[in-house]
Amino acid sequence: MTTLHITVGDRAQLREDTLQFVQGTESDKGMTEDDRAVLQFGSYDDLVDSLTPLRLELIQAIATEQPSSMREAARLVDRDVSDVHADLKHLEVLGILELKEGGPGGAIQPVVPFDKIEMHIDYPLLDDVDADSTPASAD
């Protein structure tokens, strides 16, 4: 199973994960292809702007129905072709899907190379909270 891991925030953790991946590869521990499919958003707002409910519906429709063209993908989600085209281009830039040439009649075929998307969202409620600090008393 190929999984796309989507994370939000904590760029320091992403750097650490990348270093661990490189060190694992150099020491021949090896990581599976699945371990490399990571998409990092800098903030929750970035995630929400990029993966709208309509785009998530489109991704799922493409993964399950495997349309042979952008037009067919638009029909699957009952949306305007130009809107779906713009969404597909955005999702391609993010690496969530691929647009392959050579479909019927020269159509461009959207392909989702993942079976699953997992999202991890760090959403701290307080900035730089020291774990050892004691909260102020309301007395």
Image: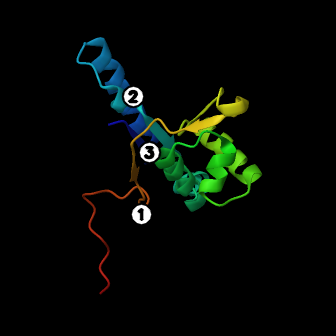
Position above or below: 24 against 91: above
Residue 139, image x and y in percent? 29, 87
Up the image or down, 120 lies above or below 68; here it is below
Q: Is residue 89 above or below residue 16?
A: below
SS at mark 3 in the image? strand
C-alpha span from label 1 to label 3 = 22 Å
Question: For the view shown, which residue lies furthest in the right direction?
Answer: 82
Q: Nearer the viewer, residue 22 or 61?
A: 61
Residue labelled with disc 2: 18
Q: Residues within 10 Å of mark 1 (few under 14, many from 20)?
A: few
Q: CA distance from mark 2 to mark 1?
A: 26 Å
Residue 61, given in percent of the width and then of the height, sits at: 52, 52
Q: Is residue 59 visible to us here?
A: yes
Where's residue 22, x and y in %?
A: 36, 20
* Point 65% across, 26% down: residue: 102
* Discs 3/2, front: 3
Of tags 2 and 1, the one toward the viewer is 2
Marked residue nearer the N-terminal end (3 or 2): 3
Determine whether the residue tagged by mark 2 lies in a helix, strand or loop: helix
Quadrant where the N terminus is found in the figure: top left
100 relative position to 117: left or right: right
Residue type at mark 3 is Ile
Query: What residue is pinned by disc 1?
Result: 126
Q: Nearer the viewer, residue 13 or 65?
A: 65
Q: Nearer the viewer, residue 120 or 129?
A: 120
Q: Amino acid at mark 1?
A: Leu
In the rendered image, which residue does mark 3 sit on? 6
